[in-house]
Structure formats: C-alpha cells, structure tokens
Image: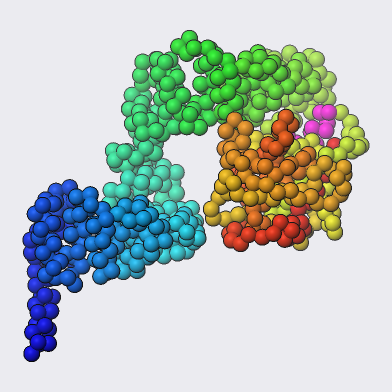
Amino acid sequence: MKKIILLLLIMLSVLFSNTPNACDVLAANPKDKSNPTGVIGVNFEKIDVVKARKACTQAVKDFPNEPRYSYQLGRVYHKMKEYKKAFEWYKRSAEQNNTLSQYELIRMYHKGVGTKKNQKESLKWLMVAAKQGSSVAQGALGMIYRDGDKGLKQDYKKAIYWYKKSAEQNVSQAQNDLGEMYYYGEGVEKDYKKAFKWYMKAAKQNNPQAQNDLGEMYYYGEGVEKDYKKAFKWYMKAAKQGNTYAQAHLGDMYYSGEGVEKDYKEAFKWYMKAAKQGNAYTQAHLGYMYYYGEGVEKDYKKAFKWYMKAAKKGNAYAQGQVGQMYIFDKAVKKDEKEAFKWAMKGAKQGDADAQYILGAMYINGTGTKRNYKKAFQWRIKAAKQNYVAAQLFIAIMYEQGHGVKRNYIKAYAWYNIAATNNKMGIGKESMNKLETKMTPQQIAIAQSYDPLKEDKEIENKLDGEKTESSQRYIGTGFFVDKFTVLTNNHVVKNCKGIELIRMGYRSTAKIKAKDSINDLAILEADKANSSFLNFRAGQGIRIGDDIVVIGYPLGYLLGSGIKVTTGNVSALTGLVNDTTNMQLTAPVQPGNSGGALLDKSGNVVGVVVARLKREQNVNLAIKSNVAQMFLDINNINYGVSMSKDKKDVADIADEAKDGIVKVICYQ
C-alpha cells in the first residue's frame, strides 16, 4: 500500500512539474525552451529576488527532479550575487541535463565565479552541452577547435563540424565563422560562394561582422559580381551597429566616391566613429584630414593628436607623420630624438613616407648622426615603392656620389622612372642634362635598365667588366622542400654565384625571390635534397620557451661541421619594438645568419638574422609567421607540424642536420 502511495506521489509530482507555478512566473528565463506553455519569463535584470527566492525554494522542494526549478533558483542567487549558491543550483540542474545551467557552469568555471577557476571542467561542460544540442555551446566549441584554445589542439575539421551544427540551428555568429573558414580555406577547400552563402545567412540576422564581410565580398567581387552599391549598403548596416571595419570602409567609399557621391564630411564622420573605438587606420586618416583640412577645418594640433594615437597602435604611416611633425610643425614642440624614433618605427614597417623622412634625418643629422650611406639605404627602400620624391633623390645621390658610388647609368635610370611616375614629368630635365655627361653606350644601357627589378645581368654591365669570384660570404640556410632553401637576404646579396653544402650534399643555387625589408631570400637548388624542415603549427612561441640554433657560425674558423647552441626566447619583439623579430639568449655568430631557429620538438619557429655587436647575449631571429608569409606570397609549398613531445637537443640536431646547409656566396 505504501509503495502505491509513493508511486502516485511521484506521478503527481511529474504531472504538476509541467504546470506553471510561482517560480516560473518570477524567475523563468524567456529563452528556456523547457518553460511550460504560457510562461513568458523574466529578464535577469528584472527578477524580484525576494519573491522569486521564496517561490523557487518551495518549487525545488516540491519537485526535486525537475531541473528547470533548480536552474531558476540558480538565476535568483546569481542576481543576488551569491555566486556559490548559484553555482550549486546550476550544477544540480546541469547534472539533470539542463543545457542553460550547463552553459552557466561553463562560464563560472572559466572565470572562477562561485568556484575555483577550472578550464578542464569548463571545457567538459561545454562538450556536454554541445552534444546535447546546445547551439551556443556548439558554436563556442567550433571556435575553440579553430583557435586551438583551452587545452584543445587546433583542428579545423572539428571546428567545421561544430560550427555547422550551430549554424544549422540559425546561430548567426557560427554562420559567420563558418563563412570565414570557407573564405580562408581552413579545414575545407577555399570556396567564396559558400562563404558568401553563410555570410548572407548571418547578415540577414543582423550580425554586424557578417554584414561587413558581405560588404567586402561585394566590394572586391569575391563569390559574387562586384557591386559598390551593394557593398555600401551592407557596410552601412554593419557600421550603424558599431562595426569599426565597416565604419572605416564607409569612410573610404565616401572619401573616394565609390558606390556613393564623394563627400569628405561624411567620410570624416565615419572615420571619427571608428577612430573613437580605437581603429588605428581611421585615426591616421583623421590626422591626414585635419592636417590638410579635408571635410573639416585645418588643425595641426588635432592632426598630431590623431596621428599619435594611430602611431602608438603601430600604424606605420602615422609613425612617419609624427616623426615629421616633431621637426617641421610649430603646433608641436620640436623634439629631434622623438622625431627620429617614430620615423624609424614607421620605416621598419615598410612605410615609404617614413622611409623618406628617415632618409632626410640621416642627411641633416636630425636626432641622429649624419650618415649619407644610411640616408641612401632608407630612401632607396621608398624609391622601390614608387615614391617619386625618393626616386629623384636616389638619382641625385647616384649622380653626385653622395652615400653611394657615383654611377651616371643608375642616376639616369632613376630620373627616368621618376619622370614616368609623375604627371608633370619631374626629373626629365635632369635626365636630359645628365645625358651630356654620358657616352651613347651608357645611355643605351640606362634606357634598358629597370632599377625596380634589379636585373643581375644589367647590374654587371653597370659595374663594368666581370671579375673573378674571389671573395666568399658564408651563412646558413634550410630546406623547406626538396629544392627550396630559405635564408637571409643579406647572406646572398650581390652574389655572383651561390653554393649549398652539407656533408654528403653539394649544389649550386640561384635566387628565386628576396625581401630586403624583412631580410629573407628564397634559393632554388639545382640538385634535390633528401630532407627538409617543418614549421611549427598551432600555438605560437612564447617568452621563456626553449629554442635551438643550428648553423655554420664563423665560416671555417670553427671547422666545417654544423654547430648547435641552445637558449630561450627572451622577448617577442626585436629592436625598437620591431614585431617581425624576437630576441634569443642562444649564442649567435656570423655565419648563423639564415639558419633555422627550432623549438624543442624540432620545428621551425624563426630564422636567425643578427647579433648585436655591443652586447654579449642579445641575438635576433625573424618570426616564423613572417617567413611563412614570404613563402606563401611566392607560392612555395612547405610543411607544418604540431609541437607535441619535447626532444633532446642531440636528437633535434640529428633529425635536422640533413635539412640545413652552409650557404656560400661568391662575390
């Protein structure tokens, strides 16, 4: 009889648990799909904690097996900021498969609210919620797999799997992220049409990021026909929701008159919106508009203010302008050292304006010692970016022999290219005058010489007769595939011949591509090599990580064999906060240049580039992402590998040695 009564009570409990009561009315989440019919729910901010706590405490007593009430009581305590009690009730509900409670646990474990911070527990509950069908948890799990975060290895295929589950439940952020993976070809073949499809789904749900991305696809004609008006429409939708990239794009379209009538005032308005949110590009553009009075009254102080904001965020153009204003503008207190510092920052990032300004500082001895050679070096970088003023300056330096050996042929070629690159033909008169000092043969050579291409055959003609290759420069390089070697540009600069050597291997090579700004060069060997190195995939290198340098230091002085040194990463930036470099404690000597910097799994994390002469233990390497970008630009295939198990240095050297070669440059 007692068993029958107990069974009836349980049945009644289940029956009435699906009937709305006071707890539902006072504390239900409007988004909870388990709410009984007729329950509207209460937004978190509007919960009446006094009434709701009483009602929900009674509800969990009456219906202990109903997870909805435990979750609602957790909400009440959460609102009261009694986080430990909130955590307890959320956990009870989560263990009864309530997905909303599970999601609260994920956040509380992640942030350490109401319990100790525990990423493993946070991830465990995220997995549980995702497998139970929580669209939000599925999207979050996709993001974690995509980034390789929270202890999970990066896995694009799993990211795609979870993003799709979330996206198919109409979660706009997952739809956008899935679109991005198709756009960039992450874990799936690059497909602009599929990217467009998912961006559109998210954009129609008012996702600002997707609206901006959709605008870009219309702007560039990717996966859809180019259409500036539609690009403008989607940029506007995203911009009105505060998306800084869309605001910047709108500013650009109003500034240039693409898809809309040119309007500097409207451009200024949208640039300002993005700039106030910290967008460095628009901050620099505001500086420009204040400086030249476009869309706003000219104001040098405000120009400097916005340039400085952008410069501090790493905008190269703004850094150059800040350097210039510290010298020439009365609105700013003159400071030559600051001027030089900021111009150098911008120049190192490849900004032609900054490189030109830095050249002027070396010429005049502004903020540094006068040095014509360095002035030439920086201004030729700007000249090769089609900066006309720099091209004219380089022509003058070659004609007069300032900072470089006098060479009328090169001077003529630079005057010629400068005259071609500006509508007024500036440089043509100087070129015509220079002809009177040249022989017909020199003029013929100069007219066929393109200084932007640096053709070696022409270079030899310019410098006179060929001489025997008697001088040798020795560096290091490493194979990234059977025929391709990566090294430093300065190792192979001005080579008349290149040879690659290691024990059991010898081959000639030629330069396939070079990057003088980042000091990298790609060599193509005439003979295949049996081994090559992989770049590190997944999490990037960190300060304090152990590293191994393998190369051929000091040429033949230390013997012909490979040498190994060890240390760790001491800083993730190089000189003057150069973000393309990192600092090492591992000893580096001349000859190590161009060698592989390896982690403790034997994967490449950098390219050794330099040692500071005045310091005993400050050595530099180019970051692997810069090297990989250079290889990508030049369509070079290379291997990547996850860094899993730590290996002994001897094993690393043994596995890597056949992929590392001595690079001999005959000059």
Q: Nearer the viewer, residue 68 or 185?
A: 68
Residue 490: in sight, yes or no? yes
How far across and how far down the image is residue 411, in percent?
74, 21
Quarter of the figure that contains the N terminus: bottom left
The residue sitting at 9% across, 77% down in the picture is 12
Residue 202 appears in view: no
Which picture quadrant has residue 8?
A: bottom left
| Residue drawn at x 76%, y 50% as measured from the top left | 564
Could you tell whether 314 is left or right of 100 in the image? right
In the image, residue 613 above or below residue 17? above
- Colour mapping: rainbow
In the orientation shown, which residue stands out farthest toward the top? 330
Whole-percent x, y for residue 610 in the image: 71, 37
Q: Position of residue 108 (x, y in %)?
A: 32, 55
- Name the one closer to the observer, 371 or 402: 371
Residue 609 relative to residue 437: left or right: left
The quarter of the picture where the C terminus appears is top right
| Point 66% across, 42% down: residue | 584
Does residue 460 belong to the magenta stretch?
A: yes
- Helix, strand or loop for the magenta stretch, by majority: helix
Q: Which quadrant holds residue 175? A: bottom left
Q: Choose top left, top right, bottom left or bottom right for residue 359.
A: top right
The magenta stretch spans which residues? Answer: 454-463
Query: Residue at 80% across / 53% down in the picture?
Result: 526
**Front-lying residue, 608 or 417:** 608
Check residue 560 for magenta coloring. Answer: no
Give the total number of marks visible in the rendering.
Answer: 0
Q: Is residue 251 depicted above or below 204 in this figure?
A: above
What percent of the width, then of the height, locates residue 235? Answer: 34, 40
| Residue 545 position (above or below residue 68) | above
